[in-house]
Each structure stands twice: as structure tokens, then as C-alpha cells.
Image (cartoon, helix red, strand yellow):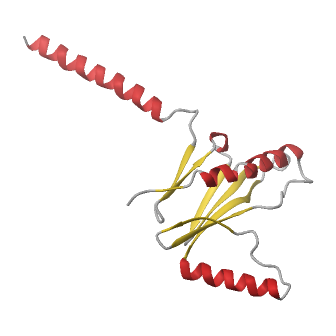
């Protein structure tokens, strides 16, 4: 009798392990995007899977920056260059920035033209900025092409933005 109970318990444990193994495989599916979660402002973004091990995130105050992270082939030096950033402003902060930019434009000065609003949620303004120059353009064509491909995917990442319910 005791042997039957032990066999039944072992069978249940085995079946449980098999179920957990296959369930985890579906969640860690290599074809899915990488999910970036910002807990401070409760949003997430879907990062393309091919970005794995090629980028670095730095969160600082109201800004999160995504950097191209590469070890340069010829020098073996690790280098990081901005791909894009997201900054969160209060409505009042953003209105002040817009006013300053308008005044600068009226005076013929450069404004913050590269900042683009992409979402407004709960009195917060979400703005992104894409790198407009490729620092590898004259250095290494392969590296430059990878950088260009990644910056070309930023718009899709931005459209994946979703607020997490609190």
C-alpha cells in the first residue's frame, strides 16, 4: 500500500515537472520580443529579439535611455551610443518646454525639434528622442549598418508602448 502511494506521489510530481517545463518554454519563446518594464511610470515596451545583448538601458530620474552597446571589432573597446530615450514630463513641465522652444524658434535659434510626444496618460507627457546621427558612419560599415537597423526599429518600439494598470 505504501509503495502505491509513493508511486502515485512520484507520478504526480513528474507530471507537474513536465507541465511546468513546457509552460516555461512557451513564456520564454525565443520568437517573442523582449519586454522592457518601467515600474516608476508603469509602462512597458516591446524590444525586438535581435536587440538581445546589443543594448543597454540607463534609467535616471524621469528619463530612460537605450544605448547601442558594442565591443568595437578593431580595438576591443566597449562603446555605448544613444539609440533613443523616453522622458516623462508633468503637463506643466512640458508646457514650459514648448513655450521655451517656441520663443527660441521666434528668435531664430535651434529648438528642441527632436522631441516627439507619443503618449499622454494621467497628467504625464511621454516624449521620445531618436539619435539622428550614426557615430559609426565612417568607422566600420558593418557596425554602422547594425546601428542604423536598430534606430530604424525605434518607431515600432514606441508604438508598442502600453500603460500598465495600477
- Front residue of 114/74: it is 114
Query: Which corner quadrant holds the N terminus?
Result: top left
Position of residue 123 measured from the top left corner of the image (x, y, whole percent):
49, 73
| Residue drawn at x 71%, y 48% as measured from the top left | 153
Query: Which corner quadrant holds the C terminus?
Result: bottom left
Q: How many marks?
A: 0
Position of residue 78 measured from the top left corner of the image (x, y, whole percent):
74, 53
Please identify the quarter of the rendering in which residue 112 is found: bottom right
Residue extending furthest toward the right: 138
| Residue drawn at x 83%, y 60% as measured from the top left | 133
Please identify the quarter of the rendering in which residue 14 is found: top left
- Front residue of 60/6: it is 60
Q: Is residue 27 left or right of residue 126?
A: left
Position of residue 43 measured from the top left corner of the image (x, y, whole percent):
50, 58
Position of residue 96 measured from the top left corner of the image (x, y, whole percent):
63, 84
Q: Is residue 53 left or right of residue 141?
A: left
Q: Is 14 above or below relative to 112?
A: above
Q: Is 67 above or below relative to 103?
A: above
Amino acid at each position: 500500500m505504501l509503495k502505491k502511494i509513493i508511486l502515485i506521489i512520484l507520478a504526480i510530481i513528474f507530471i507537474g515537472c513536465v507541465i511546468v517545463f513546457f509552460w516555461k518554454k512557451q513564456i520564454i519563446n525565443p520568437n517573442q520580443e523582449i519586454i522592457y518594464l518601467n515600474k516608476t511610470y508603469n509602462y512597458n515596451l516591446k524590444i525586438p529579439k535581435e536587440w538581445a545583448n546589443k543594448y543597454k538601458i540607463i534609467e535616471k530620474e524621469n528619463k530612460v535611455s537605450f544605448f547601442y552597446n558594442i565591443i568595437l571589432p578593431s580595438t576591443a573597446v566597449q562603446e555605448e551610443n544613444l539609440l533613443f530615450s523616453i522622458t516623462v514630463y508633468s503637463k506643466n513641465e512640458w508646457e514650459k518646454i514648448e513655450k521655451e522652444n517656441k520663443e527660441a524658434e521666434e528668435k531664430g535659434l535651434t529648438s528642441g525639434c527632436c522631441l516627439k510626444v507619443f503618449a499622454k496618460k494621467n497628467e504625464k507627457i511621454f516624449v521620445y528622442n531618436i539619435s539622428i546621427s550614426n557615430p559609426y558612419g565612417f568607422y566600420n560599415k558593418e557596425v554602422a549598418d547594425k546601428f542604423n537597423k536598430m534606430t530604424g526599429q525605434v518607431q515600432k518600439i514606441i508604438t508598442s508602448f502600453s500603460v500598465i494598470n495600477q
